[in-house]
């Protein structure tokens, strides 16, 4: 074995190899940082309403390696018509881009924090785009171009062979009826250099005529709830026309039962109030807030190919909630005489907008006159009066809108 000496001790020659392996020798150039790619747009949904598809998705906030903020400069949504099993890259290349949403992007995409770290040391995304993590909305009109199925001739020959399926020649229809024509949507975030990140799940809507809309709804309310009612539209009756260009339901496929979805249309994005389509022609909304306006739209809905298909909406029904409903008359009024005074007590009212009570008094056969100039809060009252005289009392309740209840029962009492 060869031995080396450095004046301090004697070491085996293989020690040098170990030292070289641990850092001895020439260092290479620094490796470039890994490219950060955004995660897929989240919660992509596509809901068919008449001749429009409403899209909703969440802008990415992280990268595929779980670091953040996301290296995303814009989100794009692509669509194609038909059932061709296209890859994500093929959809992006040959599909129709229907959304290109600018997003606030990081100044330095490589300056990120890990999943369990705070954002304090990272510059927030900047620019004029949409905030990361926000919910975005878009819509696509179902025009003639949308209804044309995807043309597989734009694909390479080997892919066309894998996608194009020739229909069976002649003979009766066997097995289940064919699925209706559909339109598929998929979303992707693009980096600051324009590179695509992860693709979202795909969502599909059927391209068949929507159900007929109901007749225009009506709305009425009381102090507890708003009731919205409507009538079903009869085929051939007056109303919004169906989309004649859309293909009809496949032969042998019965149209499913019709339900209804109710929307609050006062917000910038109409809010659906029904968790799922209801069979009834009536909906009750218990969100009473005096002074606010409520507007309701109703759409007929059916399920086709696993997706909910809604009609157009007739004009909405709007009501401004005005409190014209008086509280109940105070109950169980009782009196107790004492020396030079009469004390009244009654059951407290339970209305949420109660402002208080008004006390009324009469002497002998006189009419009752208001004794308290303003409503009192307590459900008891002490009246100092002349001894030996008989008095008659009654109480009314008042709410915050100024509505006054009927009189309570009357009581008669004489002070001692």
Image: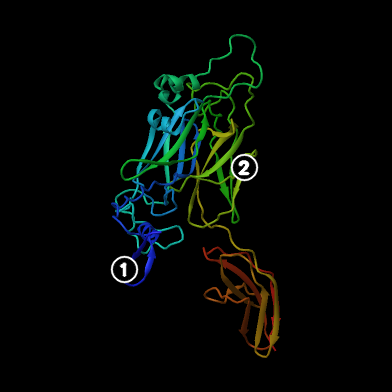
Left or right of residue 28, residue 84 in this image: right
Residue that lies at the very extreme toward the front in this rendered image: 1
Q: Quadrant of residue 8?
A: bottom left
* Dot placed on the residue nearer the N-terminal end, 2 or 1: 1
How far across and how far down the image is residue 111, in percent?
34, 56
> How is the structure coloured here?
rainbow
How far across and how far down the image is residue 385, in percent?
62, 86
In this view, the residue in front, 281 or 339, is: 281
Residue at position x 64%, y 15% from top?
173
How far across and how far down the image is residue 335, in percent?
70, 79
Which circle, 2 or 1, is nearer the viewer?
1
Label 2: few (<14), some or many (≥20) within 10 Å? some
In this view, the residue in front, 162 or 360, is: 162
In this view, the residue in front, 390 or 224, is: 224
Q: Quadrant of residue 231?
A: top right
Residue that lies at the very extreme toward the top in this rendered image: 170
Find disc 1 in the rendering and name its residue: 6
Query: In 3D space, how far apart are the residues under numbered discs 2 and 1 (Cα atoms)?
Result: 97 Å
> Can residue 364 be seen from the camera position used here?
no
Find disc 2 in the rendering and name its residue: 282
């Amino acid at each position: 074995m060869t031995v080396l000496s450095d004046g301090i001790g004697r070491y085996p020659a293989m020690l040098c190899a170990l030292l070289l392996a641990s850092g001895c020798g020439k260092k290479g150039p620094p490796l470039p940082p890994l490219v950060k790619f955004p995660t897929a747009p989240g919660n992509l949904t596509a809901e068919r309403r008449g001749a429009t598809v409403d899209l909703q998705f969440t802008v990415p906030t992280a990268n595929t390696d779980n670091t953040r903020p996301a290296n995303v400069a814009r989100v794009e949504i692509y669509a194609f018509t038909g059932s061709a099993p296209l890859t994500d890259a093929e959809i992006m290349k040959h599909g129709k881009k229907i959304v290109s949403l600018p997003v606030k992007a990081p100044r330095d995409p490589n300056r990120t924090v890990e999943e369990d770290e705070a954002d304090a040391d990272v510059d927030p995304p900047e620019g004029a785009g949409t905030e990361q993590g926000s919910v975005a909305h878009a819509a696509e009109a179902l025009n003639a171009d949308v209804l044309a199925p995807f043309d597989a001739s734009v694909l390479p020959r080997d892919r066309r062979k894998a996608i194009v399926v020739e229909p069976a020649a002649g003979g009766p229809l066997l097995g289940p009826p064919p699925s209706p024509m559909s339109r598929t949507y998929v979303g992707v975030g693009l980096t600051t250099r324009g590179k695509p990140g992860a693709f979202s799940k795909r969502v599909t809507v059927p391209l068949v005529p929507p159900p007929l809309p109901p007749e225009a709804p009506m709305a009425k309310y009381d102090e507890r709830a708003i009731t919205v009612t409507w009538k079903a539209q009869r085929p051939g009756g007056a109303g919004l026309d169906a989309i004649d260009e859309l293909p009809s339901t496949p032969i042998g496929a019965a149209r499913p039962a019709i339900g209804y979805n109710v929307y609050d249309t006062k917000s910038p994005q109409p809010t659906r109030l029904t968790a799922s389509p209801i069979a009834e022609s009536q909906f009750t909304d218990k969100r009473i807030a005096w002074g606010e306006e409520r507007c309701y739209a109703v759409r007929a809905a059916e399920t086709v190919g696993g997706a909910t298909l809604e009609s157009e909406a007739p004009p909405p029904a709007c009501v401004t909630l005005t409190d014209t409903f008086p509280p109940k008359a105070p109950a169980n009024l009782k009196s107790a005489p004492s020396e030079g005074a009469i004390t009244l007590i009654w059951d407290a009212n339970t209305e949420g907008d109660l402002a208080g009570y008004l006390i009324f008094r009469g002497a002998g056969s006189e009419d009752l006159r208001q004794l308290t100039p303003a409503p009192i809060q307590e459900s008891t009252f002490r009246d100092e009066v002349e001894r030996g005289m008989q008095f008659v009392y009654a109480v009314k309740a008042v709410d915050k809108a100024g509505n006054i209840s009927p009189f309570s029962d009357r009581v008669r009492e004489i002070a001692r």
